[in-house]
Amino acid sequence: MTPVDERIITALEGRFTRAADSFGTLLLEIERERLLEVVARLRHEFGFALFLDVTAVDRPGRTPRFDVVYHFLSPAERKRVRLTLGVSADDPTVPTLTGVYGAARFMEREAHEMYGIRFTDNDDLRPILLYEGFTGHPLRKDYAIDREQPTVPYRK
Amino acid sequence: MQVDHPPPVSSPLARAADPGHVVLNIGPSHPATHGTIQIIVEIDGETVRRADVHCGYLHRGFEKEAEHHTYHNVIPYTDRLNYCSALNNNFAYAEAVEKLLGIELTPRCIWLRTLLAEYNRIADHVTCVAASVMEMGAMTAFLYLMTVRDYIFEHLNHLTGARLTYSFVRIGGLARDLPDGWLERLEEILQFCERYLERIHGLLDRNGIFIGRTRDIARLTPEHALNWGFTGPILRSTGMAWDLRKEMPYLAYGELDFDVPTGIKGDNYDRYYVRMCEIDESISMVRQCVRKLPGGPVTVADPRVVLPEKPLVYSEIESLIHHFKLVTEGVQVPAGEVYVAHESPNGELGFYLVSDGSGRPYKLHVRAPSFIHVGGMHTMLEGYEVADVVPTFGSINMIGGECDR
Amino acid sequence: MAMMDYLTTRKDELVGWVRKFSLFPYPFVTACCGMEFMAVSSTLYDTDRFGAALPRFSPRQADLLMVVGTVNHKQAQVIRKVYEQMCEPKWVMAFGACATSGGFYRNYAVVQGVDKIIPVDIYVPGCPPRPESVIDAIMMLQDRIARDRHPILPFEQHAPDGTSSA
């Protein structure tokens, strides 16, 4: 654990369930309700100005089923942080970060169409890589890889 | 027989907010959109009031494919992400897997990967500049740069076997070592590149038409760029000197001597100029790598990842079984997760790999810089003119394979 | 009459010769093959020598639709529309492995070959194909155009039984 990690862990004491080092990235497991608070503090106190990524991991056998994973970068501290929060399949909602970072718009749309994660208060969750009329969420483990949904009737 | 064609994704601009405005659709099949992208703009005369950008016309299911293939079989898929600089993607992916495996690369491999990454960066920036200026009519510059790029392709073809999508990396090293005469030819190509770049500078840098079309267009401030997730040459053109190779070095960048060029205004002209300067820096870095290249093996001798020698495979049963298991089941990577980011020519290219201990990735997510940049592109279009859409889009260097994955 | 057949075959030769050396490609570029398309149109491997250099980015003005790169289901409607907007005579070249058969992408997003949507005249294998392969394909297509029938005269448009011979 580097000094930067120690400072972040001390400042966010009680707001995460687990902290670990993942090959140089600080990993924090948090609860869904803490997300906006933790993100705001990371941004304003530690300079995590660059929102890198939001995605999800589907673990079908486990409860909660989805892990929503966020990555942030602080150019000032030269540090990356990964936030992980568990989300269940029957209530896959997570607060949106579009009010904090503009970059969240496209990334949340992609996480929504690929995994079905709903971002509350984000009213633009149109498909971005897929198309309207596509049913299902392809990156979930129960979606068969070659289940195609053609938009144009095939010839012959 | 006419088939009904509704648009794939509805747009809030389907009806113009103001009856005096016109909604114009640019793309997805358009001469100036390199890669397929659809930009729907609402224009008032010539000025763009609102823009809605749609991507996804090249979505090829990279992440789903990666979950169904072994770690080595994923390498050709990573090539086709940012296909202009395929080696950078290869190396970033391989580093993610090697981190989970705990493999330390040989010195020669590290320096060769650095050399090839910079060499491919030259090719990518050349392609970006060539395509974007061609759209503004500078056909001469395009043809000069295509010639340079073709020599680089043929040279890499001599090394890897392919002109564009190399698949040269292996987990734990590279596919093969350099052939004879490769480094001499490399120096020839770098000199040729420098001569032609001088011509491009002469054609474009002080060209009134070029300046008129790119200066003060699509300006970005560093705060705005960071908020919208811009990295790479776009962020550097705003004046912020953030380069992963300098700030969070990986491979052999800590031992190389190079500058990080930054812009002043964050407009299209600065993005072009930052890329041209980065080509010069890359040429210098390639030459440093050639001078400092150590000897030794290029692949680490770790039985978990390296196939045994063929004579042994044909004679010993242990080697045969080892070879069989490595090829069919894949490299067994311990369970865990890792996020590795490299400074690709477009920005921060990150691979988030989750492994469950088997020979196939459990999840492989690509943090694609082009995708994020396209997400922020509408802020660079609104307020400027319709004719600026094309140079702005060209200056972002959206590569479809990376944006849509 | 034999004389009429002789004259129409000579006319077909002339029209075929003219059409094959004045191809106007519509490069429907989507993916990595586009880089090779740019290379084959540039100075080192030049398609201008074969008359197929000038791209026409309007389907109304083009006669060779080059499907360069992967076509996915989102793009399928677009390419169908572009193909329908082109006027006869038109040819389609499936450039690259993805356009030919879906390449090595076998998943929910990719159309397994553009010939599932539009008829293809010539396939160019490779991922991406070398520029020499592309030129070879253009030359093969030109041979085919040269040998084809070109019913452009009024009496050739409709056969006596009312069917069109276009």
Image: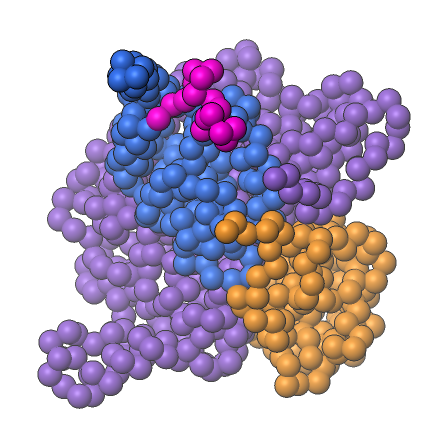
Q: Classify residue C25 as left or right of residue B223.
A: left
Residue B374 versus residue C103 in the image, above or below? above
Frontmost residue, B276 versus B15 = B15
Residue drawn at x 55%, y 23% as measured from the top left: C60
Q: Chain C drawn in what color?
A: blue
Q: Chain A drawn in what color?
A: orange
Frontmost residue, A9 versus C27 = C27
Residue drawn at x 69%, y 23% as measured from the top left: B386
Could one spot residue B276 in this view of the protein? no
Q: Classify residue A22 as left or right of residue B118.
A: right
Q: Is residue C163 magenta?
A: yes
Q: Classify residue B192 as left or right of residue B2.
A: left
Residue B96 versus residue C5 in the image, above or below? below
Q: Position of residue C41 (x, y in %)?
A: 36, 28
Q: Position of residue B83 (x, y in %)?
A: 43, 47
Could one spot residue C156 in this view of the protein? yes
Q: Is residue C133 magenta?
A: no
Q: Chain B drawn in what color?
A: purple
Q: Classify residue B308 as left or right of residue B9.
A: left
Q: Position of residue A134 (x, y in %)?
A: 68, 58
Q: Quadrant of residue B352?
A: bottom right
Q: Quadrant of residue A19?
A: bottom right
Which image quadrant: the N terminus of chain A?
bottom right
Residue drawn at x 79%, y 62% as measured from the top left: A119
Assign the magenta stretch its main secondary structure: loop
Q: Which residues are magenta?
A: C149-166
Residue C152 versus residue B237 in the image, above or below? above
